[in-house]
Amino acid sequence: MNTTATNRKTKTVILLLLIFGELLSTFDKVAINVAVIPISKEFGLTETQMGLVISSFFLSFAIMQPIGGSLADRFGTRKVIIISLITWSMITIFTGLAWSLASLITIRFLFGIGEGSYPSASVAAIGETFPFEERSRAKSTLSAGGKIGGALGSLFVAGLITGFGWKLMFVILGCVGLLLSPLYIKYYRPGGIDVQKHSTNEKITLIELFKKPLLWKLMVVYFGFSIVSWGSQSWLPSYMVNVHHLNLVSMGALITIPAFFTIVGVIGIGWILDKYVAGREKIVIITGSLTTMISLLFMTQSPSIVEVLICMTIASISIVSGVVTIFTIILKHIPSSGVGRASGWIYLSGNLAGVVAPTVMGFMIERFNGSYEAGFWFLIAALIISLLIGLTIQTNLDKTNKKEGEIGFQVQ
């Protein structure tokens, strides 16, 4: 087998394993959003307490993002990803042993620690393995794996809960992760042969990263996007059941419809980012913010489930396109030695949103007598911030610095 074919095989294997990990981690995160419905009945939880259970995961998950990114930059992504997979799978099993509100919050906090290193390490793995001109497509394909997990997760988890109960559902999901871990130990060995000629050996310190206005702007934009993402993921199942009177299985099935359309959309946006809007990425961020705001506004006023699904689909595609664009900017505008750390801090901001969004939405719903409309207006307000900051982002293509096989940018 020649060098090119060998390297192509390496990249394919790494990307497939990253996608499996992304899919499984999404399954495990989605599980609590569906399971919180029977859990709240069993433990007698209010909406605010339900929000705290969901948010406890995001607090530790957020804390681990920069730590995991730094570890990936220092030790490589292989060790970080394998340890993370095994740890979060074991704690997923422990979730099924919860017996009270306090135990649920504690276990979900530990789950966030176990899974928290994976996202930034997976972005760093793309930087390790793929050349510049392929990174948007690699990241968008990886994001599609997460959307597949979101699409199938609600339906799969709802089916498991209906058939076996919420406790055994968590045990089954955790066992799946442990059974997959030997594949990662044997085959997960990132780093392409030809990627080195596309990458820079420039070292960048954490202090130098923080001196870049671009990093701070992306953190704020991602925070706003994540308010919408985590807020809607946490409360849409309850919204569909309580407002549109669907049962768990019907809800899980219908939520898959927007997710599958989003999979196609997110792969397409990766191709567009690589081919057509390099250096002008903020166009996607601005468009995504505006489109999502309009979609959420219409969704709150939609009387039929069909209209709700259409609005959900448009909003989902728009948000994921913006998120892929943020990490495309990181992968193409930050030296390879700092991709893990930069991604970690971006993910930190997003998961702080995960701490805030479920609890605030739960409070808003409870405060306004069960009205979900108030919660969705909170999401729209977050998008206004992302839009305003997105307008100030500059990623200007510097053609004088463009070399063969390399994309060079000046960033602000």
Image (cartoon, rainbow, N blue to C red):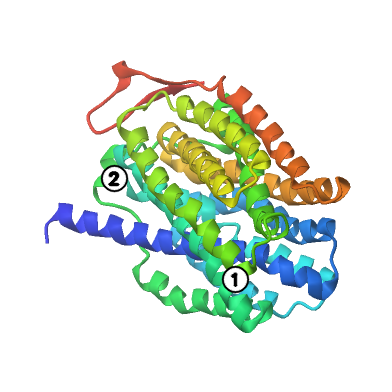
Q: Classify residue 10 by image quadrant.
A: bottom left
Q: Position of residue 286 (x, y in %)?
A: 53, 26
Local crowd size for mark 2, using a 10 Å CA cut-off: few (<14), some (14–19), many (≥20): some
| Residue at x 48%, y 26% (from the top left corner) | 282
Q: Classify 276 as above or below 250.
A: above
Q: In this rendering, does residue 124 appear at all?
A: no
Q: Position of residue 7 (x, y in %)?
A: 23, 54
Kindly identify the amino acid type of the residue bearing the numbered disc 1: Ala
**Is 148 in front, or is 104?**
148
Q: Position of residue 66 (x, y in %)?
A: 61, 48
Q: Classify 289 as above or below 341.
A: above
Local crowd size for mark 1, using a 10 Å CA cut-off: few (<14), some (14–19), many (≥20): many
Q: Classify residue 364 by image quadrant.
A: top right
Q: Which residue is mark 2?
A: 195
Kindly identify the amino acid type of the residue bearing the numbered disc 2: Val
**Is 119 in front, or is 275?**
275
In the current view of this chain or complex, which residue is farthest to the left? 2
Q: Is residue 176 left or right of residue 400?
A: right
Q: Earlier in the sequence, mark 1 or mark 2?
A: 1
**Is 101 in front, or is 330?**
101
Q: Is residue 363 left or right of residue 277?
A: right
| Residue at x 80%, y 75% (from the top left corner) | 42
Q: In which quadrant of the rendered image does the N terminus lie?
A: bottom left
Label of residue 267 in the image:
none
Q: Which residue is mark 1?
A: 158
Q: Classify residue 48 by image quadrant.
A: bottom right
Q: Secondary structure at mark 1?
A: helix
In the current view of this chain or complex, which residue is farthest to the top? 400
